Image (tube, helix red, strand yellow):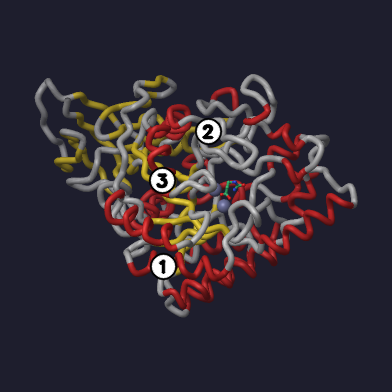
Amino acid sequence: MAMLIRNGRIVTAVDDYAADILVDKGRICTIGEHLTVGGDVEVHNANGLLVFPGGVDVHTHLDSATPTAHTIDTFGSGTRAAAFGGTTTLVDFCTPVAGESTLKGLEDWHRRRESACVDVGAHMTLLDADQGTLEDMKTLIRSEGVSSFKLFMAYPGALMLDDGALFKAMRVAGANGAMTCVHAENGAVIDVLVQEAVAQGLKAPRYHALTRPPIMEGEATHRAIRLAELAATPLYIVHLSAAQALAAVTEARDRGIAVHAETCPHYLFLNAEEYARPGFEAAKYVMTPPLREDGHQQQLWRGLKTDDLQVVSTDHCPFCFNEQPYGLQFSKQQGSDSFSRIPNGAPGVETRMSLVYDGAVVKHGMSVNRFVEITATAPAKLFGLFPKKGTIAVGSDGDLVLFDPAERWTIRATEHHSRVDYTLFEGREVTGRVKKVFVRGQCIVDGTRWLGREGMGQYLRRGESGRA
Ligand code: URP
Ligand code: ZN
Ligand code: ZN
């Protein structure tokens, strides 16, 4: 059925105007003033509301195994949560099991992905840069629409690649239209600090942050940039948290190097004070990189304003705080006797759009166009999804969000749709709320009502990445 949004204020990364939008067969077919349609068209009144392109979150870990834990959201629950928060496209991290090929990893990921309610693409995590893996990268790019690869500079013995392997993978990505996404922390040094802390009996959650100093994020970011420069590949720094890392990105961009970076809402709105929470409560905030001291946040906002940071994504990597009802495998409680065993990661997919609108537009005076750019358009462009996703234009998918810019509301985990049992932002008041959400023209969220269904999300074969 065709669908018309009437009287909205359409906001893209570059436009801001009042018009109607007609969506037919899943795609936007007409944008104009006072469109007339027949009685067979479903009409939604957007009077007083902003109309955004559906949010694009390019950093999630749904139904994903780590060496000791498993994220609690399935693709069904995680994408439903995303939709309630105004995000209609995800690019999720596929991490193969050690010893298995990336192609097998993607096959398994596709089975899990079948329950998705919104459209989903995949990045591939590389666990090595052996000849077979480098060959498979080309197949993934050309035949499977996977045009970005995650490389870890942290977690030695599990995920970390040495500099030679990073360089080899970057070279193949660069020569074949793909981008490498790097987790930039000096894993070898951090490992020394972690072992020393544990040996001294310093095991509370706050030592997670104290053993991952920002200077080691800065060092690794600088190294990743230099390797990417030599390998002639576009680079994307994931979950950037530290001023030192941003300084390295800024310096490289000023030299014209194709380096891009994202930060996440938790780094923009929270700081290391959370680790002073009593008892094990601070484990909720154990993610990598950790929350930083105050000064870093100002730099991140500076980066978003000057385009040294291009994207805000969530790194939604949810583990329950409590062991019940899902079991220890899905819970932070695994690390109750030592921070080194707390599963790293935190939820966020449902709160990104409102938090960033409130922070960027309401509190930091950024334009509403820039809000759309950092939450939808830039990630779509960087990861080969534009203009199908990330904008409102004739021919683009009818992924749309009706947003009330004036509604004040309070974030509560009990009102969320993720299976995780907490939010990092409990009790935080924000201005700006998602009212309706459409995926390819179908209304899937209407206020608090869920109208979507598991399995309606499509797989996104992406074009080249890193060419924005
Ligand atoms: O703590 C985090 N960020 N967990 C997710 C995995 C990653 O490094 O992105
Ligand atoms: Zn990471
Ligand atoms: Zn992540």
10 Å crowding of disc 3: few (<14), some (14-19), many (20+): many
Nearer the N terminus, badge 1 or badge 3?
3
Nearer the N terminus, badge 2 or badge 3?
3
x and y percentages locating residue 69 in the rendered image: 62, 36
Q: Which residue is drawn at 41% across and 43% down?
A: 104
Instruction: Specify whether residue 427 is in view.
Output: no
Element on which disc 1 rests = loop
> Of the residues tagged 2 and 3, which is closer to the observer?
3
> Of the residues tagged 2 and 1, which is closer to the observer?
1
Q: In which quarter of the image is the C terminus?
A: bottom left
Q: Mark 3 points at which residue?
A: 91
x and y percentages locating residue 44 in the rendered image: 26, 27
Report whether 174 appears left or right of 236: left
- The image quarter containing residue 338 is top right
Q: Mark 1 points at which residue?
A: 234
The Cα atoms of the two marked residues, 2 and 3, are separated by: 29 Å
Against 50, is 141 above or below? below
Question: What's the amino acid at mark 2?
Answer: Arg
Residue with the most extreme bottom position: 255
The Cα atoms of the two marked residues, 2 and 1, are separated by: 40 Å
Report whether 122 appears left or right of 66: left
Instruction: State whether label 1 is within 8 Å of ligand 2.
Output: no
